Image (cartoon, helix red, strand yellow):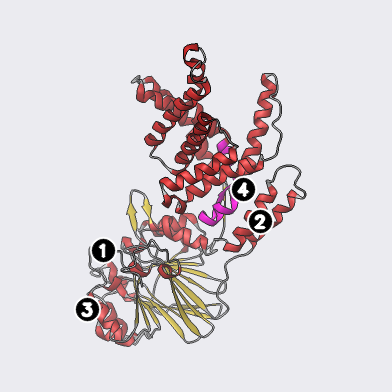
Amino acid sequence: LVGGFAWRIVRRMPALTRRVPARRVAAAVGLAAATAYTLLSGAEIPALRTLMMLAVATLGLWLGLPGTAGVVWLWALAAVLLVDPWASIAPGFWLSFGAVGLLLFAGTHRLAPRRPRGFAARTRAGLREGVAAQWVVTIGLAPGTLALFQQLSLVAPLANAIAIPVVTFAVVPLALLAIVVPVPALPVAAHAVLEPLVRYLEWLAATPHAAWQQHAPARWTVVVATLGVLWLVAPRGVPGRWLGLAWLLPLVLVVPARPPPAQFDVLVLDVGQGLAALVRTAGHTLLFDTGPRFGNGSDAGSRIVVPALRAAGTGTLDRLIVSHADSDHSGGALSVLASLPVGRVDSSLEWTHPIIAAAGTRAHRCAAGEHWHWDGVEFAVLYPFTADYADATLRTNNRSCVLRVAARGFTVLLTGDIEARDERALLEAAAPLAADVIVVPHHGSRTSSTPDFVATVDPRIAVFTAGYRNRFGHPRPEVVARYARLDATLLRSDDDGALWIAAHDGALAVTSARVAQRRYWHDGADAR
């Protein structure tokens, strides 16, 4: 807009245009405005990409070497990486440059049509061009979007068709003008235009099936789908372009493998100071705790647990266990219940708790003695005892649900936040505590993991779920030493990240996300 205004003014100034062509001046003025806007907006990748493309195009115009749009795109790509090499690990980098690159590729070798005459003809041509661009961007970015976010908006074309022109030609100019011209009517006008747009976008987002959600696709399917996309949006004249759709099918149809029958795996998520563990069998899924609430409407359920479930190909939960009411274990439960179908909710919560209200008739209480079998895997609730619910003096920790999962000689113990009192009760009841893997009680607090309890469990692997530099000092050194004396392998979510524990094929395997997804820029001092 600024460049266009500058061009209209400069071309009427012969004294200037005899020295410098109007287009060069307009391009320089537009670039200066774009630089100011980029800095004002925070210089995020999409804005930086646009600025660099404008800078390269302007430089080419001044040097008399305009080049093609593809050359401008490539130089802008190099310039962004030169300014910020870390941009390459940002999703916005790939999506922003990918969208523009696809549009350029889809238009390659096409003869530019003559500009139609008449408002109606130009409008029809603009609509056709806009629909074609939306098709190219939507289908072209599908592999990358699914790989990065495991979801794809199906209403994006309808949203963009209205939002892009409204924001571009009304909201942003009015808001920027209000910065320069302190007239109260300008921001009021910008808000008046934006408000109905936001209502429209909220309505679109709330429509059924607004987004396609699925598992994290395998890497090879992303590569194949990308090749299919390039074939599908190739310029006219490339034969059999529609066959590119077939190359997208593996992206959707190849799902993550589940454990074989009579075997299971456990994913202990890194949710900071809290706990969330996913247990999968051949045909069932259980979630034990949901991580902490972060405040301001944000929690581990929406930010960590649900994306992890989706990435693992879990669209429904057969059972959710909320061990107790503490926020670091129950904080994400409402988000999980709102995001996924859940068959049953077990907890030690009071019947008036909001999670119980959200679960409705699916809510049940954890009670020792309850057990069930899924696909040859045995699940047993060891604690709390029914009498514990009648004792009003007990803290919430003392009613934590304890779950034992066993199959083919391998056992995992999920203990919530039980303390010394509860551990003694379990020992006195002769509960089957021996386990190959234990998620250590109460994050390794000194109030838990008593010597007798640790000796009875005698784990091969002890997992401490603690937040990085948490204020409680968890896990406590003396507790860590008790497990170390048993030669247990010690794993910590703050050091090792998420932990995948697989009891498959007669062996117990543990994979650390920090190791499996190691990058050279990670701090190596505390990595295992």
Closest to the camera, between mark 3 and mark 2, is 2
The mark that comes first in sequence, 1 or 4, is 4
Q: Secondary structure at mark 3?
A: helix
Q: Secondary structure at mark 1?
A: loop
Distance from label 3 to label 2 (Cα)?
A: 54 Å
Pointer 3: what residue?
478
Task: Name the residue at 51% across, 54% down.
Answer: 149
| CB within 8 Å, label 1 to label 3 | no
Closest to the camera, between mark 4 and mark 3, is 4
| Quadrant of the image occupied by residue 352 | bottom left
| CB within 8 Å, label 1 to label 2 | no
The mark that comes first in sequence, 2 or 4, is 4
Q: Nearer the viewer, residue 353 or 100?
A: 100
Distance from label 1 to label 2 (Cα)?
A: 44 Å
Pointer 1: what residue?
470
Amino acid type, callout 1: Asn
Task: Name the residue at 59% across, 54% down.
Answer: 143
Disc ID at residue 157: none
Image coordinates for residue 359, horizontal then vertical, percent? 45, 59
Residue 360 visible within the image: no
Disc ID at residue 140: 4
The mark that comes first in sequence, 3 or 2, is 2
Amino acid type, callout 4: Gly
Q: Secondary structure at mark 2?
A: helix
Amino acid type, callout 3: Glu
Q: Nearer the viewer, residue 148 or 202?
A: 148
The mark that comes first in sequence, 1 or 3, is 1
Distance from label 2 to label 4 (Cα)?
A: 11 Å
Q: Is residue 248 left or right of residue 11?
A: right
Pointer 2: what residue?
248
Distance from label 1 to label 4 (Cα)?
A: 43 Å
Q: Which residues are magenta?
A: 141-160
